Image (cartoon, rainbow, N blue to C red):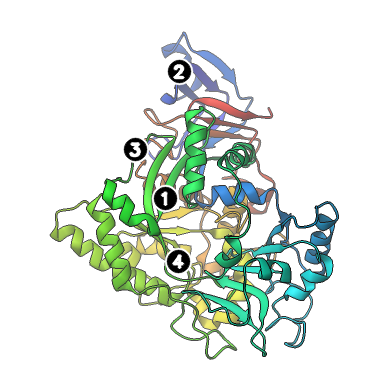
Amino acid sequence: MIILHNAIIHTQNQSQPKVSALVIDGDRIIAAGETNYLFNHYPRAKGQDMRGRVIVPGLTDAHLHLHQYSLALQKIDCEVDTKAECLRRVAERVKTSKPGEWILGHGWNQNEWQSPPLPAGEGLGVRGWPHASELDTIAPNNPAYLTAKSLHAGWVNTNALKLANITASTSDPHNGQIQRDDKGDATGILLETAMGLVGRVIPEPTIQEITDAIEKAQHNLWKMGLTGVHDFDRRESFMALQALHAEKKLKLRVLKNLPVELLDEIHAIGLRGGFGDDMLRIGNVKAFMDGALGPHTAAMFQPYAGEENNRGILNMDGEELFEHGRKAAQVGLGMTVHAIGDRANHEVLNAYEQLRNYEKENHLPALRHRIEHVQVIHPDDAPRLAQLNVIASMQPIHATSDMLMADQFWGERAKLAYAWKTQLDFGATLALGSDAPVESPNPFWGLRAAVTRRRADGSPSVEGWRGEQKLSTPQAFAGYTSGAAYAASMEDRLGKLAPGFLADLIVLDADPFTCNPSELLAFESSATMVNGEWVYASL
């Protein structure tokens, strides 16, 4: 038993919001209050002087791809301002690679490159997209595959196209597109499910390699202040997490969501949401309704500005999604659905409305259904998440990354883009995250984005981009603590520093509730406790 004392402790517990000491026994907090009182009542507890530092509940990233994030730490970082710098980094990796070895990178975004878009033409991309020939020049003896920042597009070279047997006669896969030039030849850009044509010929990492990568990535996440994540990767990620957990090396609380493609098997064995323990447990069934803003595949009611024939890609309608949700509900599993565009969100909400009626009619529990991203929503649909008790799982850092694209391609529709405050005002629960590796999983970067809606350089203005959607610091913190705990059905033991709650906390050198919000960019944890154990410390 220990007493953490001489601290400024923000508990997120409304009945006792700020204390100076905590008593921790095993994996639980057993008391919170003033230092002298707790020492008198727990005389056998060992004191640990926190020297005036700030303690807050451990933060949870409510939307992260743990497998992909962990492996991305080994890939070329392509999140740069220009295509030239991206190509330079690829060329550097080629120098140290063997002929025939795959060159893998992540993070490019053609919408953000500072150089002007190239016109369509021989050897050049379509609408400013990059082209396979540009990778061919620097990687003539290696297949190359670079995933876009959104994870909804891939850029490959000719060697990769050949290995995937992609030719002018290859048909587009369902819900995907092979981008082609005026002659019908593949340009090297693959959208949505077409990425899988190349992805399946890349040698898969072993489960042990994934396990090792996740174990190492934990240290990054602890230092950032994360004590838990909601993971949206697939089978291999789950196997690696189970291996780590069995070896008692999993020291990050994980809610594991399951892919809708496996719903028949999940239904057949009767796997329920919440199965597992407090370190690794089953969450919801994950489905994709559409694409993303970056590659212009998010499903919209009206066309993208400047693209009168493009309304994005809608993977299914509300009726099909309802059928998935109905089957999941029969075994006690909620749904969590990726929806970016206004039409995609509309279809998801229609399905959830049917699903709520189905739950009532069949005397089933009202499950914790979620929409992932809610990036732009039609005004008529904005109140419906709260009305249907659907969790808004949103990523504040997307707004500061995407704001210029949103204004350019969505125009006035962007008034309700990344509209966290609107959802909160209507009464929806916010669960906040990063979508890493699409963005950095650093929760303090997300917190700053939520309260300022400004980029790291301070742009666009003091008021921030569409500043009416800013959150207060307590509102944003709730999204990473109590909101994420509610989404995981763990609000009775997670997200607060209160008696009976799990001892997950972080120690900070400054107070995030009183500092200038711009200072949040430099925050990191001085020490991180998970399950009553110090898993990281630089005190």
Three-letter amino acid code at the position of disc 3: Asp
Q: Is mark 1 on a helix, strand or loop?
A: strand
Tell me what residue is drawn at x 46 percent, y 63 percent.
421
Quadrant of the rendered structure where residue 325 is?
Answer: bottom left
The answer to whether one can see residue 10 in this image is no
Q: Which residue is drawn at 58% across and 75% down?
A: 406
Q: Nearer the viewer, mark 3 or mark 1?
A: 1
The residues bearing labels 2 and 4 have C-alpha atoms spaced at a distance of 44 Å
Dot 2 corresponds to which residue? 38
Specify few, some or many for label 4: CA neighbours under 10 Å numbering under 14, 14-19, or 20 or more.
Answer: many
Residue 74 percent location from the top left of the image: 70, 48
Which residue is denoted by mark 1 in the rendering? Answer: 257
> Residue farthest to the top?
44
Q: Of marks 2 and 4, which one's residue comes earlier in the chain?
A: 2
Q: Are marks 1 and 4 in contact (CB under 8 Å)?
A: no
From the top left corner, tell me how far across and down residue 143 is, in percent: 72, 63
What mark, if any, has residue 374 been given in the picture?
4
